[in-house]
């Protein structure tokens, strides 16, 4: 990354070794100016980092809120779709139940027809036997 690509939090200031080694009282005029300049840059960088950190914090809060709202919207839509599915399932099951009832009615009708035929046949046989018995 180039220096322009770095964020405020990634920027570091390089402190020269003599700034830590030599006491302030023993520094030359030029070194005092350089030390003062370094401290000003350090303070400006700290302020910029704090400002950037607050900006990132605000963006994080905004994104969390937005994410929460989207999650709530999704849950709402999902709940509605869930209710629709139950309603459609209920209609489907009612139709299935209606089909089963029709099938049962058809089977009952077929069975009733067979019973009627058998009963008619039994009656005819009984009449035939009765006639035969009366003729004897």
Image (cartoon, rainbow, N blue to C red):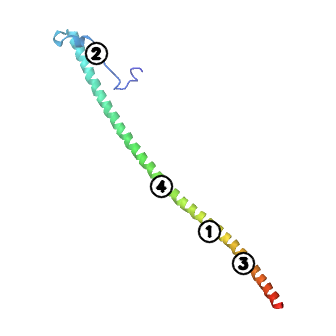
Quarter location, residue 122 = bottom right
| Label 4 vs 2, first from the N-terminus | 2
From this viewpoint, which residue is outermost toward the right?
A: 135
Q: Residues within 10 Å of mark 3 (few under 14, many from 20)?
A: few
Pointer 3: what residue?
116
Q: Is residue 35 left or right of residue 116?
A: left
State which mark lies toward you, 1 or 3. 3
| Label 4 vs 1, first from the N-terminus | 4
Quarter location, residue 39 = top left
Q: Is residue 131 above or below residue 115?
A: below
Q: Pointers 4 and 3 in contact (CB under 8 A)?
A: no
Q: Nearer the viewer, residue 30 or 95?
A: 95
Pointer 4: what residue?
80
| Label 1 vs 2, first from the N-terminus | 2
Q: Pointers 4 and 1 in contact (CB under 8 A)?
A: no
In space, the residues marked 1 and 2 are separated at their CA atoms by 90 Å
Pointer 1: what residue?
101
Q: Residues within 10 Å of mark 2 (few under 14, many from 20)?
A: few
Percent x, y of residue 85: 52, 56
Element assignment for label 1: helix
Q: Nearer the viewer, residue 51 or 19?
A: 19
State which mark lies toward you, 4 or 1. 1
Q: Is residue 66 left or right of residue 38?
A: right
Pointer 2: what residue?
15
Element assignment for label 3: helix
Percent x, y of residue 59: 36, 37
In space, the residues marked 4 and 1 are separated at their CA atoms by 32 Å
State which mark lies toward you, 4 or 3. 3
In space, the residues marked 3 and 2 are separated at their CA atoms by 111 Å
Q: Is residue 80 left or right of residue 11?
A: right
């Amino acid at each position: 990354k180039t220096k322009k690509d770095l964020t405020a939090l990634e920027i570091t200031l390089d402190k020269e070794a003599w700034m830590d080694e030599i006491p302030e009282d023993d520094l030359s005029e030029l070194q005092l100016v350089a030390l003062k300049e370094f401290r000003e840059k350090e303070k400006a960088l700290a302020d910029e980092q704090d400002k950037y950190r607050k900006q990132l914090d605000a963006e994080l809060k905004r994104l969390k809120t937005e994410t929460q709202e989207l999650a709530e919207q999704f849950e709402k839509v999902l709940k509605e779709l869930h209710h629709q599915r139950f309603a459609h399932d209920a209609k489907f099951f009612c139709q299935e139940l209606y089909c089963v009832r029709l099938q049962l009615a058809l089977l009952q009708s077929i069975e009733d027809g067979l019973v009627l035929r058998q009963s008619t046949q039994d009656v005819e046989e009984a009449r035939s036997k009765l006639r035969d018995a009366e003729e004897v």
